[in-house]
Amino acid sequence: MGTSWDLERLAQEWTARGLDRRDLFKMVASGGVGMAIATLLGTARAEAAAARQEAGGAQVSMIWRTPNTLSPLFSTAGSEQQVERLIFGSLIKMADNLDPIPDLAETVEISDDATVYTFKLHQNATFSDGTPLTAADVVFTLERALDPRTGSYWRGRLLPIKGAQAYGEMVSGGGGATPEAEADAAATGSLVEGITTPDDYTVVLTMGAPNAAFLVNLGNFSGLGILPKHVLESVAPDQMMNHPFSLAPNVSAGAFKFVTYETDQYL
């Protein structure tokens, strides 16, 4: 059976080997849970290898895994998310002191009761093909993540948004959006009640209840990378995972752009 890890056990094993507890929490907060476990296991293996060497020899083995996806909607492995962090921009990212800071958002305002989060986007942000990145791309990404047909692990993290559950039930019911919902979306920018776009560079997320942890959840792992609506809008939600874009995200808004991925060779 596989070994089960939680943060408490990870911290205990980490400090037992003389490693700095603060380094662990920085690594976990920035999406490096897999890296933390690999570091821990590497330390344990190094100790075991030293003991074996004293006994007359040792062998060190490394496991390399190819990515299953490079789409922010679906990745769960640290190795995938570390690549995505370079390719995709997100509304916010985690700083090394565990604080969420703006990324594609220029500013983030939070209401006193932690129910309303207002993101002002950089107005000069573009995707790698030169297309401006706007609030419509953020809404598209959030709606795809919340759509049960997509199968994104981000859905659970975004359900605190007001109306998110109702949106999921509506779109997965087979009947599509009602005329009333379509009219509301035309006015607010989204089919989700708690997502509104007052202008092309502002996204307002309203929670169903006070949620002071929302920004931290939004910035965990590599953050929710913003997808290009103009590239993926025609892809059905249940086809997003298997679409070629998932392993060749050639239009993105991060610091680096995807060029090529040769299986089992390089990316």
Image (spheres, rainbow, N blue to C red):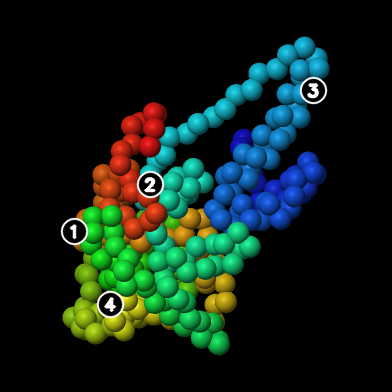
Instruction: Tell me, yes or no, if residue 73 can be seen here.
Output: no
Residue nearest the observer in this picture, 169 or 4: 4
Q: Give the label on residue 70, or none.
A: 2
Q: CA distance from mark 2 to mark 4?
A: 27 Å
Q: Residue at x 75, y 26 (%)?
A: 48
Dot 4 or dot 3: first in sequence order is 3
Image label count: 4
Q: Amino acid at mark 1?
A: Ser
- For this orientation, the residue located farthest to the top is 56
As measured in the structure, the alpha-carbon distance from the residue carrying label 2 to the one carrying label 1 is 19 Å
Can you tell which quarter of the image residue 45 is in? top right
Front disc: 4 or 3: 4
Q: Earlier in the sequence, mark 1 or mark 4?
A: 4
Does residue 249 sit above or below 195 in this rendering? above
Amino acid type, callout 2: Leu
**Between marks 4 and 3, how big is the CA–CA gap?**
62 Å
The residue that mark 4 highlights is: 200
Q: Which residue is mark 3?
A: 51
Does the CB distance between marks 2 and 1 fall below 8 Å? no
Amino acid tagged 4: Asp
Looking at marks 3 and 1 on the same chain, the residue that comes earlier in the sequence is marked by: 3
Residue 234, which numbered label?
A: 1
Residue displayed at 44% across by 46% down = 83
* Label 1 Cα neighbours within 10 Å, binned few <14 / some 14-19 / many ≥20: few
Q: Could you tell me how far apart the alpha carbons at marks 3 and 2 are, in whole angstroms?
A: 39 Å
- Label 4 Cα neighbours within 10 Å, binned few <14 / some 14-19 / many ≥20: some
